[in-house]
Every structure is written in structure tokens, then in C-alpha cells.
Amino acid sequence: MSITRKILIKIFVKPFYRQHAGLFVFLFIILFGAVGMVDGAGLMAFHISLVQGMLKNIYFLLLVFFIWSLYAKKTEQYIGNILRRPDYLFLHMLSQIERGKLFWQMVWIQFLLFLPVTVYLVIIFAAGIYLHVWLNCLPALFFLVALILVCAGWNVYQILHPGHSGRIKKEIITFRPRETSYWSLVIRYIWKEKKLLVAGIKIYSCLILYEMVINQTKVEYDLSMIWLFFSFGILSHGLLIYQLRNMEETRLTFYRTVPRSLLNRFLQYAHIYLILLIPEFITILILTPFYLHFSDAILFILFSYSLLLFLNSLLFIQFFRIKDYLKIILCIFLLIYFCVLTVSIPVLCFFLFLSSIGIFQKRYYRFER
Amino acid sequence: MLQFDHVTKNYDRQQVLEISKLELGRNIYWLQGINGSGKTTFLSMLAGMIPFTGDILLDGINLRQNPLPYRRLVNFAEAEPQYPDFLTGTELISFFQEIRNAALVQIDLLINIFKMHRFISQPIGTYSSGMIKKLSLMLAFIGKPALILLDEPLATLDEGSIHILPELIKAYHKEFNTCFIFSSHQPFKSYTLAIQKILISDQSLQLIT
């Protein structure tokens, strides 16, 4: 293997999988671990019917393509971010490699980044052969190859045109202030740079809540399992919160020096997470009161809000390494499990709210990364 | 008046700074010391960015006990400032202008002085390191702070801006009686500024008169 390829794998591929290990484990659990007996069928039958639906229903296939495109956007964003980082400026050397060679290097990198999708494509082909519809698998293969080539091409363009940003606007003479608040800065960061992650989390948490709640019968109204699956979705916000705090500690450090009271600073976060939870709140409102009792709806809202505030405050105790933070999240999940079993979710909400305020108050000014 | 009372700073149990007693008047101070001597740590502590033990008081206001009133008096420009790429200079300046209650006339003046018209409405992601540095310096001069801290203010600046800075420091010191503490490895060319030097070595500060 050439030294260039080795370095590229070290820079682009290994950190990508390290950083997204949690997401892949989560998807694996959802696709394989969480599937039990579906209408009497097992895991194998579930996946074969899934692939069958994909190969025989064009809309389903388009949905799969859409999800793959989101993944492609994710890899593109990931590489683009690395290329813009000051500590990776030396990568401009890549522009000295002959263009065709560079393109194939990036195709190889993209292929490695797309491995999870490729593995799933192999499964699709295996199922296609089993179902005697393997020809129907070809569009999926072509689409994946096209995605890899397009992403590689775009990466080459980014390498050859660093900092490309379009036209320069006309000179302005008088300064016109613009309304800018801290919470809006963070929300804009999420919108600009984390929309894929947010979309993934929201799709999961809202869909799981909606689907599981409407499948409840009025006779057997039991929310225990829903609590567990929903809390999994809310806890997955931890990844986003971690990245937000990381961004704050690198690009919004100035905020620590501005004259804002501690209460005001806490309210900024309260504002951010209130906005972030709007999709879940809307889903809960849609389900209430027909499928969900008022008291449960309020509890779901309080639970998700207090949990996000708590996850945020935790990162003021210490900027944990991501794996330690994920371990803490797992412990919180076990605590939630215990509270679901003992029907003490309201107590948990109260505890999370008070702890988040207490930790923030104690730790904000003492925190140092 | 800036007062230090038994101030210490540790990183992983390793002491990097110890200031038992020190008082600094409202003057202009050039912080000097070799790499790793603790200049940035000292300025970050003063700005309230990192925790420490002991007390720092500015005009009698204790940083740890009254973080809000203290922060109203202090502005800080980091050595290697970083801001979100998607924000424009205009937005960031607006943010500071609102918080610092600064007059728009002052903002216009600073934009003119730093010659930032051309790029101020562009996203910061398109700025060069020099432009980001200018922006961070400009932000430090917004309002009427009692203390302005500048960490390596001359690094990455163009020749024109290097000459502007001493003039601006002089003007703020005269107009608002602002105290300045800056660190710089580059020679600070000004014959009209009365600069006092503070030397950081062996984890302690020494005022050179």
C-alpha cells in the first residue's frame, strides 16, 4: 500500500469509524438486536421481507436510496470538515498529485467509508438470488457505485479548490447590527453542520414513539416498552450534545468572557433544548389525548427535556472522552429502566431537573477543558 | 486597580503559576516570557476563562465572587481565535455590541480603523487567519472596558494593522483610562506609549520598572 493511501486511511477512514462507532452499534441493534418475532417470523424472515419490499416496491427502494444519499452527505461533510481544519492544512499537498490518481485514491477512501452500505448491498444481493430477483438488485448496485464516484469527485474538487466560497460582496460603509443571541448561534450551528445527525435522531425518536403508541390498545395500555425505546432516542441526543459542547469549547470560547449571569447562561441552554425537542413535542401532541393520556404526555415532555438538560450539564463536570460519556449514558439508560420498572419516572424527571441546575451552577465557572 | 491575592494555577497537580500578592495600576503592561511560561494561562485567568485558586480583583470587584460585574469590565482577544465558520463578522460584532452596550458610532469607527469593510459581511469560514485576528482584536475594543487583555495581538497582522494597534491602545488608555495587558514575542513599536513590562518566569510574575 502506498504511503499516501496509508495516510489517507489514517486521516479519513479510521477516525470516521471511531467517531461513528456508537451510531453503527445503534443501527445494528435496531436492525438485528431489537427485532424479535415479527408475526411469528424470525430475524431472517424479517430481513428477507425487508429486502423483498425494497426490490419489488419502487417507493421503498427510493427511500433506501434517500437514506444512502444522507450517508453520502455525511461522508462528504466529514471529509470536507477535515480538509478545513487548521491541523490538516498540510493536506493541500494532495493537490500536487496527478488528478486521475487523486480521484482513484479518493474512490478507494469513499469505498472504505461506504463499507457498511456495501455490506448491506451484499445482503440484498444474497436475498435477491434467494428470491430469484437478483436483476432487481442492479439499480441498487449502480446507485451505490455512482454515489461513491460522485463523493470522490467532490472530494477531489474540495482538495483542488480549498476555501472556495463564491463571490465577494460589495463594500459596506455603515454597520447595521443584526439580532444575534447565543442560543441562536448554537441552533444555527446545528442547522448548518449537524442536520443529518439531528434528522436521524428525530426520525427514530418520533417514529418509534408514534408507531408504538398508536399500536397500543385501550384495553392494554402499557407504556413500559415505549418508555425504554423512546428514552433510547432521547439519550441518542447525547452524541449531538457532546458535539455541541465540543464546538463551544473550540469556537465559542469567547462566550465565557462576556458579561452574562449564570441564570442567563443556563436559560440559553434551556432555550436550545426546547427548540431541539419540538419534533418530539409535536408527535406527543398529535398522540394526545386519543392514544396517550394527558398525564403521560406531560411526563414524556418533562422527561425528554430534563434528560437533555442533564446530559448537557454533565459535560460541565468534565469534558469526558466520548467513550466515557457513552458509558455514562448507558448507566442513565439503566437508571431509566429501573424507574420504568418501579413506576418512578416523575421522580426521575425531578431529579434530572434539579441535578442539571445544580451541576451547572456549581461547575460552570470551574469547568476547564 | 488590579489585585492578585494568593493566586495559583495548576494543570494536573503541576503548578504553572503562583502570584502571592501583586497590584497593578491602570497602565499598559507588556507581558513577557518564554514559550510555555504561562502567559496565555495568566491572561485566560484574568479573562475568567479558566478556573484558579485565590482572588483576582479589578477595581475591588472579585472575579470569583462577582463574575458578572467583573466580566463587564474586561475584554479579551485570544492568541488564536476561532469562531463558527457560518457566522458573519457583522453578526459576531452585533452580538458583542449588544452585550457591551456599545454605540454604533464606535463600531463604525473600529471597522474603519481595522479596514474591515470588504469582508465583514462574509461568513468567517472565508476569512484568512489575519482577518480573523483583526476581527478578534476589534471585538476586544468594543465598549468601554476597564481592562483589555490581548494575547499575541501582533501575530498574523499585516503591517498597517501593526501600526494601528499602539495608537488605538493609546487612545483608549487616554479616553477611558483602560488598562492593557498584552503578550507579544514581536517588538511592540511605539515611542509614545509608556509601557511597563511584566516578566513571567519560574511560575511567578515580576513587574519590571
Image (spheres, coloured by chain):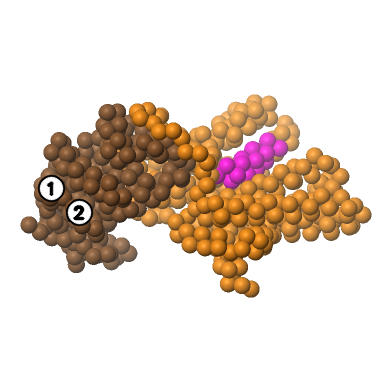
Chain colours: A orange, B brown
Please, what is the three-letter code of the amino acid marked with disc 1?
Leu
Check disc 1 and report the residue beneath it.
B193
Is residue A307 something one can see in this rendering?
A: no
Dot 2 falls on which chain? B
Q: Chain of mark 1?
A: B
Position of the N terminus of chain A, as image quadrant, is: bottom right
Left or right? Give the position of A311 relative to B185: right
Residue at position x 21%, y 38% from top? B145
First of labels 2, 1 by sequence position: 2
Say which residue appears at 59% left-offset and 34% top-offset: A279
In this view, the residue in front, B190 or B91, is: B190
Q: Main secondary structure of the magenta part?
A: helix
The one of B191 and A293 positioned closer to us in this rendering: B191
Looking at the rendering, the stretch of residues picked out in magenta corresponds to: A194-211
A230 sits left or right of B22 in the view: right
Residue B53, by quadrant, is bottom left
Q: Give above or below for B20 relative to B126.
A: below
The one nearer the camera, A311 or A288, is: A311
Tag shown at residue B188:
2
Say which of B33 and B106 sits in front.
B106
Image location (x, y in percent) of residue A129: 89, 57
